[in-house]
Amino acid sequence: MSRPGVITCKAAVAWGPGEALVVEEVAVDPPMPEEIRVKVVCTSLCRSDVTQWESKAQPALFPRIFGHEASGIVESVGDGVTEYEVGDHVLTVFVGECMHCKHCVSGKSNMCQKLGLERKGVMHTDQKTRFSIKGRPVYHYCAVSSFSEYTVVHSGCAVKISPASPMDRICLLSCGVAAGIGAAWKVADISKGSTVAIFGLGTVGLSVAQAAKLRGASQIIGVDTNSDKYEKAKAFGVTKVINPGDCDEPVQQVIKRLTDGGADYSFECVGDTGVVSSALQSCCDGWGLTVTLGVPKVKPEVSAHYALLLSGRTLKGSLFGGWKPKSDLPSLVDKYLNKEIQVDGLVTHDLPFSSINEAFNLMKDGKCLRCVIHINK
C-alpha cells in the first residue's frame, strides 16, 4: 500500500486578527504516526472561532486556519493507527482522549494530559503544523482547523460515527451542543423539579435548556439581551425569558424573586466574567451551583464576594460539558439519531464554503445560532 502524499486543497485562511478570511490553496501534509487526515464535509461556526479570530492577544499565530466543529471522512491514516480505516465517518473534537493518562483513567475528568486544549497553533505530537502556503507554515486552531477541504488531526481527537448520521447536522455535537448538554447532565447533574437560570441563549445555552427540560426542571429562566432569540428559546424548554436591559433592578434580583430565593442551578454561556458573578448571585444559598461554559473575550479574571461561597454556593467550570469524547460522544450521537435530543433546530443557516465570511458576519451581528458551512458547495 502506497504511503499518502501531500494534498493541495482550498482552505479559508485568516491572515490577521479580525481580517476577512481568504480562500487560499494550501498544502496539507500526510498524517504522522497516531494521526489521521480527514476530508471535511461540513463544519459549523462556533463563537470561540470568532473570539479567537478577533483577538489581538496572540498576533503571532497567523496565518491560521480556524474551525473545530466538523464532520468528515477519513482520507488516510498514519503509522500506528488501528482504530480508523479510510472511509470512516468521524467527528473532530478540540479535546482528545488518549485513554492512558492520569485524567483519562481517573473517571473524574475529561482533561486529557496528552491531548488537552491546544493553544499554540500546532499539532500535539511534534509541535509542528501540517498546513503550508508556498512553504510558509499555517497555524492550526484547537488542533482541528476544519475550515479546509482536508485537515490532519490526532487520532485521539476524532470520534467514529455511523454513516447514517447526517453530516450537516451531526457536526454540532463536536462542540456547542455537546458542551451545553454535558454541562447540565454531567457537570451540574440537574435534578427533577429544580429551578434553572441560563445566561446567554445561543447554541450552548439552548442546549443547556433542552437538557434541563429533559431532566424535568420546573423552571428554566433564560437571560439574553437579544429578543430575536426568545421564540427559539421557548421551543427548547425555556419557560421565561428576561432581558436585563428591561429590568429596573439587577437581573439576579429578578431571578431570586421568581425562584423564591435563588435558582438551584445557573449557567454562564456568554463568555463574560462579569456575567459569571451575576449567575453566581442568582443562585440560592446552601446548594446553589453555577457552571461557567463561556470563553471570555476580555478580562479573564472572575471576581465575587467571598460571602457568596461561604453561604454554600459552588462555582464550577466546564470544558466540553465534561464529556470524554471517545467514551461518551457515541452515546450522544445515538440519542440524536433516536430523536431524544434536538440538534437540527439550532441550525439557522446553511452556507457554501465560499460564503464563510458571511457566516462570521452573521455570528458577530448576533443574527444566527449555528451556520453550517458545506465545504464542497
Image (cartoon, grey):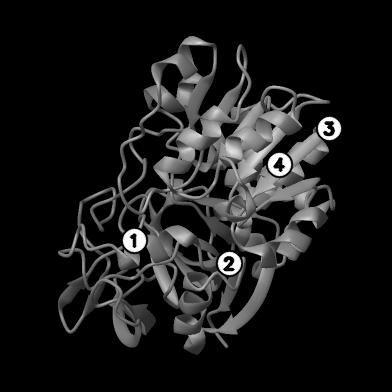
Q: CA distance from mark 4 to mark 2?
A: 21 Å
- Relative to 182, does residue 368 appear above or below in the rendering? below
| Label 2 SS | loop
Assess disc 4: are there few (<14), some (14-19) or many (≥20) residues with their C-alpha within 10 Å of its C-alpha.
Answer: few
Between label 3 and label 4, give the one nearer the viewer: 3
Which tag, 4 or 2, sits closer to the chain's start? 2
Of residues 70 and 321, the one nearer the viewer is 321
Assess disc 2: are there few (<14), some (14-19) or many (≥20) residues with their C-alpha within 10 Å of its C-alpha.
Answer: some
Q: Check disc 1 and report the residue beneath it.
A: 52
Between label 3 and label 1, give the one nearer the viewer: 3
Assess disc 3: are there few (<14), some (14-19) or many (≥20) residues with their C-alpha within 10 Å of its C-alpha.
Answer: some
Could you say which disc has been placed on residue 218 in the image?
3
Q: Check disc 4 and report the residue beneath it.
A: 331
Which tag, 1 or 4, sits closer to the chain's start? 1
Of residues 84 and 54, the one nearer the viewer is 54
Which tag, 2 or 1, sits closer to the chain's start? 1
Residue 266, picture quadrant = top right
Q: Check disc 2 and report the residue beneath it.
A: 87
| Label 1 SS | helix
